[in-house]
Amino acid sequence: DTAVSQTPKYLVTQMGNDKSIKCEQNLGHDTMYWYKQDSKKFLKIMFSYNNKELIINETVPNRFSPKSPDKAHLNLHINSLELGDSAVYFCASSRDPLSYEQYFGPGTRLTVT
Amino acid sequence: GQNIDQPTEMTATEGAIVQINCTYQTSGFNGLFWYQQHAGEAPTFLSYNVLDGLEEKGRFSSFLSRSKGYSYLLLKELQMKDSASYLCAVRDLITGGGNKLTFGTGTQLKVEL
């Protein structure tokens, strides 16, 4: 049973395109996150939602828009993709915003050419 | 903001003990975490310290000194499968009751025969 799943696993696209990454968790958690891990392996928080409400919104370009249709799903839409957006994007979830353990999805490797 | 420092890479021998250090500066400390990340995989939770002292969990232990802004992860009886990146992360409480996890750049551990 997959706890946190993401689709697609790999995404190769051209500059200027718009793409979405989907994330689902079947753990019954209230809180979900998006992280970006760049080529230097630096893992950085982008967004967090709790019960479908945005609670963390780090300084990311407004080309990135998260959407949480329900508390089990958190999708990431990226407009006008740029070369610098190439990275691995990880979704994660936790029982609530104060839980100490976050469960990460397998990651989506985005390559912008 | 946060500043988290850990060595970029370390090498150790199978069966030995290795200590990975992490120093941090933060404004709203609410816990220190260690995650393990194998190449091409998602980070997985290893340990959590919020009070000073040592937390032991099988072959892995983690230590925290809040006054010194210092933590270490101790791995005993090293196995080849312990070759991975070890990420130190600091949690801060944020406005609205959530928490934000900030990761260091990770220490790449190589275990040799």
Image (tube, coloured by chain):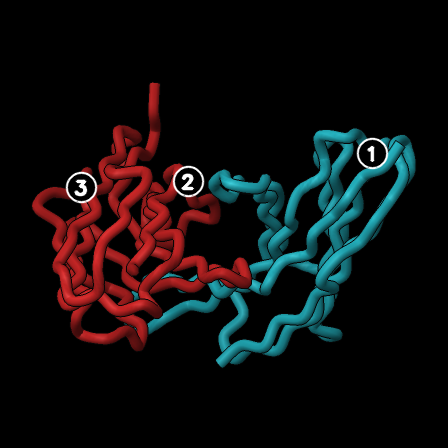
Chain colours: A red, B cyan
Q: Is residue B66 visible?
A: no
- Above or below: residue A83 compared with residue B107: below
Query: Residue flagged by tag 3: what amino acid is it?
Result: His
Q: Which residue in the structure is indicated by mark 2?
A: A103
Query: Residue flagged by tag 1: what amino acid is it?
Result: Leu
Q: Are marks 3 and 1 on the same chain?
A: no
Q: Which residue in the structure is indicated by mark 1?
A: B78
Q: How crowded is mark 1: few (under 14 residues within 10 Å), some or many (20 or more)?
A: some
Instruction: Give the image location of residue B1, x and y in percent.
Output: 48, 81
- Above or below: residue B69 compared with residue B112: below
Q: Do labels 1 and 2 share a chain?
A: no
Q: Which residue in the structure is indicated by mark 3?
A: A73
Under circle 1, the secondary element is: loop
Q: How crowded is mark 3: few (under 14 residues within 10 Å), some or many (20 or more)?
A: many
Query: Residue flagged by tag 2: what amino acid is it?
Result: Tyr
Instruction: Give the image location of residue B48, x and y in percent.
Output: 60, 49
